[in-house]
Amino acid sequence: MIAVGVVGAARKWSDTAMIPSIILGVVVTVAAVVGALPGGNWKEGQLQWPEIDLLARVDELESAAAAIAEQQKQRDKESDAQIAELRARCQGLDDLITDYILAHEPPPDDGMVDEDRLQFFEDEVASAEQEVQVRLFTGEDYDDGIGLDELRENLEELRGQYRREERRQRAWKRFPTARG
């Protein structure tokens, strides 16, 4: 823009073309040096140059935001550790209460002793697992009216009963006075 104004002065152009070109050229050059265009009111001739240290303040704010994020991560880690510790305590308390309740249950009225009952459940679970495996291996449905999904449900139910009986017997050992 300054060059256009100088060339216009050398060729004797009108002042209305040269003076605004030179002024705009100077403003653009100064803006390039400062790093930002000025603001303000052009009609009244007021120019307001932005503060040059804005980038330094932006860097400060970014570093402060990063520090806050790091503190939050640290608090989250501490909270997660506390929550895990509380969950472990609650699980231990839940196990204690469940064992206490199971220890006070009367033994099943099936005419078996504890070892025989556990052996019965082990045999039933093994038999059900074998039946499921055979049907999975052969891919056949038999004419017995029981599907594979039903066999799997029965297997899970037997496993649950076995685990319950096993836990009941451990609870009786843990709380021997409860059995009477």
Image (cartoon, rainbow, N blue to C red):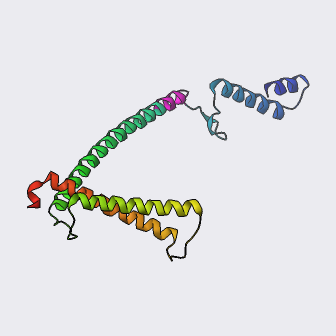
Query: In the image, 95: left or right of 124?
Result: left
Query: In the image, 166: left or right of 126?
Result: left
Q: Where residue 116 sits in the image (x, y, percent)?
A: 25, 60
In magenta segment, residue 112: no
Q: Where residue 81 sits in the image (x, y, percent)?
A: 32, 40
Count how many numbered circles sit on residues in the image: 0
- Determine the residue positioned at 46% across, 65% down: 152
| Magenta segment boundaries in residue numbering | 51-60
What main secondary structure does the magenta stretch of the protein show? helix
Q: Where residue 145 sits in the image (x, y, percent)?
A: 51, 77
Query: In the image, 125: left or right of 135?
Result: left
Eyeballing the image, is 135 above or below 29? below
Residue 77, by quadrant, is top left
- Determine the residue positioned at 49% across, 62% down: 132
In magenta segment, residue 59: yes
Eyeballing the image, is 67 above or below 99? above
Residue 155, by quadrant, is bottom left
Q: Which of 108 and 22 is in front in this view?
A: 108
Q: Nearer the viewer, residue 8 or 86?
A: 86
Where, quadrant-wise, is the N terminus in this rendering? Answer: top right
Where, quadrant-wise, is the C terminus in this rendering? Answer: bottom left
- Determine the residue positioned at 19% across, 55% down: 171
Q: Where residue 30 sits in the image (x, y, percent)?
A: 67, 25
